Image: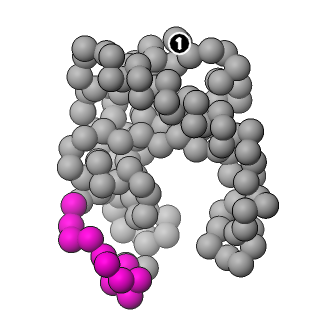
Amino acid sequence: MRLTAAGYIGAGGMLADWLSRVPDGLKTDLRFDVPGFPGGGGSDFASFDCAGAPGFSLGSLPWNYFLYTWHTNRDTFDKIVFDEVQRNAVLTAMLTYLAAEDPRTMPRDPRVLEGNDRRTGQPLTWPKCGEPQRKFSEYPR
């Protein structure tokens, strides 16, 4: 399982504090990326980042998912690891509760992005808000 601070430098401390209050069984094999990188492309949390609201990613380890099944006819329900889905759901709920009860505001200081996107070769940038694509043909590839 992986949790990333999504490129927010000061977010790691608060996330670590909340994680310290979560039962150890939910943190087994947790990889915590600090500060990590902001969402991009089609990530679910990029729309939060572009609006200045920290969005975080919690996901299962990919076990070569992106090399073998991602967006192919092999991407079927039998690849779901239900124990990981359940653990992610419980951990998400607990972190959400801890965030809602915390009087502190999540730091929004973004890391400086250096280097180029390995897919496009363009310099790395923070997500920018734009008009939503309503048709597949509008989606940038």
Residue at the spot x=49%, y=64% of the render? Answer: 118
Question: In this rendering, is residue 75 above or below 20?
Answer: below
Q: Quadrant of the C terminus?
A: bottom left
| Residue 32 in sight in this render | no
Residue 59 position in % (x across, y down): 58, 44
Majority SS type along the magenta span: loop
Report the residue marked by disc 1. 20
Question: In this rendering, is residue 12 above or below 73?
Answer: above
Q: Nearer the viewer, residue 101 or 56?
A: 101
Is 36 included in the stretch rendered in magenta? Answer: no
Residue 87 position in % (x across, y down): 65, 33
Residue at the spot x=38%, y=88% of the render? Answer: 137
The colour scheme applied to this rendered structure is one colour
Residue segment shown in magenta: 129-139
Query: Going by the image, does 25 lie left or right of 10?
Result: right
Secondary element type, mark 1: helix
Question: In this rendering, is residue 88 above or below 124?
Answer: above
Which of the 4 image quarters holds residue 110?
A: top left
Query: Going by the image, does 90 lie left or right of 56?
Result: right
Query: Going by the image, does 2 lie left or right of 61?
Result: left
Question: In this rendering, is residue 136 above or below 111?
Answer: below
Q: Nearer the viewer, residue 83 or 117?
A: 83
Q: Quadrant of the N terminus?
A: top right
Residue extending farthest to the right is: 78
Residue at the spot x=29%, y=48% of the render? Answer: 48
Residue 53 position in % (x across, y down): 25, 41
Amino acid at the residue labelled 1: Ser
